[in-house]
Image: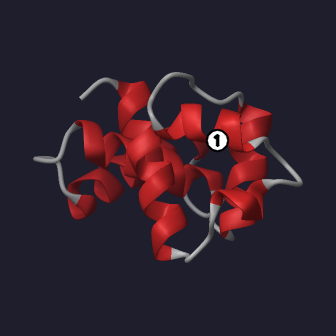
Amino acid sequence: MELKKAFGAALKHARAVQKKTQEDFAVVSSRTYLSALERGMYSPSMDKLDTLASVLELHPVTLVASSYLNAEPEMGVDVLLERLKEELMVLHGPGK
């Protein structure tokens, strides 16, 4: 699955799970833009990703990780989390 579409699916799914409507994002985004994101027409900026995640009460990385799980469903949550942990340990060291 293309990453823009995978992100859109992740955003829409997270919104449904959190029982949020597109109107709940009105303070941070127009319904038109949110709909376009959910349809995979655009990719959000880092700032917009952070803002959208805050409305959903999620860490922005959760939305990004969910996007990659949509794009590569064979990976699975446990495999992705282990990979992220290993890569972050290399980049930042343990306990940081």
**Side of 92 where 8 appears, left or right:** left
Judge the density around disc 1: few (<14), some (14-19), many (≥20) Cα neighbours within 10 Å.
Answer: many
Residue found 38% across the figure and 31% down from its top:
5
Quadrant in which the N terminus appears: top left
Against 6, residue 75 (above or below) is below
Q: Extreme right residue here?
A: 27
Residue 17 coordinates in the image, percent (x, y)? 46, 74
Residue in front for this viewpoint, 74 or 20: 20
What residue type is disc 1 on? Answer: Leu
Residue in front for this viewpoint, 28 or 65: 28
Label 1: which residue? 34
Residue found 20% across the figure and 39% down from its top:
72
Residue found 61% across the figure and 64% down from its top:
95
Residue 27 coordinates in the image, percent (x, y)? 89, 54
Residue in front for this viewpoint, 93 or 49: 49
Residue found 29% across the figure and 48% down from its top:
69
**Side of 28 where 93 appears, left or right:** left
Residue 55 figure quarter:
bottom right
Q: Is residue 44 visible?
A: yes
Residue 44 coordinates in the image, percent (x, y)? 65, 30
Q: Is residue 89 visible?
A: no
Residue 35 figure quarter:
top right
